[in-house]
Image: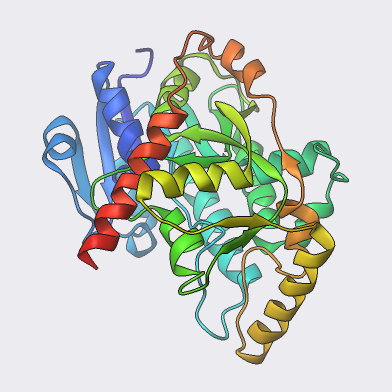
Amino acid sequence: MKYQKVFIVGGAGFLGYHASLELTKRGANVTALALPNEEIDEELSTSTQVVRANIDELSDEQLSALLIGHDALVYAAGPDDRIELAPGVSATEFFQTQLVERTERVLRIAKSQGIQKAILFGSYFSYINNHGLCGVKAGSLERHPYIKARVDQTNRAFALGDESFTVATLHIPYVFGVAPGKTPIWKHVFVDRFGSSSQVVYGNGGTTIISAKKIAVCVAQSLELANNGDELAIGSVDMKFTPMIQQLFKAAHIDKPVANIPTWLLSLFMKKEWRSMRAKNLDSGLDVRYLAKDILGRDFYVDYKTTDNRLQMSDYVDDVDQAIEETGQKMDQQNSTS
């Protein structure tokens, strides 16, 4: 590999875990930054140098000491849009702090320590927003705090890029796959959230999907081939929400029907949910008032084939079905032990 010493922020997380293993498989020396109490399996601990620390508790000097000597950085940390915020917490302030300010600080220090290239994990929401894709008016999705933060995150990161410091973003869609010690986010989204409900009700739109393992390969290829300022929309397949959830439930042995409803009707339910959240002083990364109209009722399909060609991955064997199967099996195991 062109870059032999790679520092991965979030290197033991769901996506960072697979990136760490892929890069070590290609001969890179990887330092994986993990949270103090994060579960680390034997494969990761023996193939990488694991450093345990909360990045927010590190001074600039301490972070500099960790980064010095590396020539590339992968930023695979940050909260998901579906995270549940505590009462009274502003989604805007939370995501601006956790995504924008934290990313900018790490990349600024990385640049000062001579790191030559950074790959940032972003969201396809911001890519669709910025380019006005999928029937979305450019900039209109920024009324969602999470998406606004993702837009700002990429902009701030790119502002640091120059001839000596290459910064590129991978815009990530819905992801399936498993990692040690991680509960699939889809268990919360499609199982826990609907509880004892007789069915799962979701939007009539669709999404691009990718596996965690393919993201790892995209990381490795981006380190070799991406240029400064590259926004790379990645994926493997486009799928409507209903068959996607049904396939996941089949793998998880969940016998529950999935219904998609018109956007106007889903919007009514969402506005009722928003009023309930307001009464409890709860905020969210995606504004539920507009969630159906902006996202769940649309087909968010991005042109990942162009990126596959750009990253010389046109021969990558699609593994989304396997990733969905593995995700469902892990959900089934966790349901059996809970």
Q: In the shown orientation, is residue 88 left or right of residue 34?
A: right
Q: Quadrant of the C terminus?
A: bottom left
Residue located at (66% from left, 16% from top): 306
Residue 95 visible at all: yes
Residue 10 visible at all: no
Q: Quadrant of residue 211?
A: top left
Q: In the shown orientation, is residue 217 left or right of residue 99?
A: left
Residue located at (28% from left, 45% from top): 12
Which one is nearer the viewer's eye here, 61 or 122? 122
Which one is nearer the viewer's eye here, 161 or 113? 161
Snapshot colouring: rainbow
Q: Quadrant of the N terminus?
A: top left
The picture places residue 241, in percent across and down from the top left corner, at 62, 46
- As drawn, 92 above or below 263: below
The picture places residue 69, in percent across and down from the top left corner, at 29, 30
- As drawn, 262 above or below 25: below
Residue located at (72% from left, 71% from top): 270
- As drawn, 54 above or below 3: below
Q: Farthest residue to the bottom: give it.
A: 279
The picture places residue 159, in percent across and down from the top left corner, at 66, 39
Q: How many marks?
A: 0
The picture places residue 158, in percent across and down from the top left corner, at 64, 37
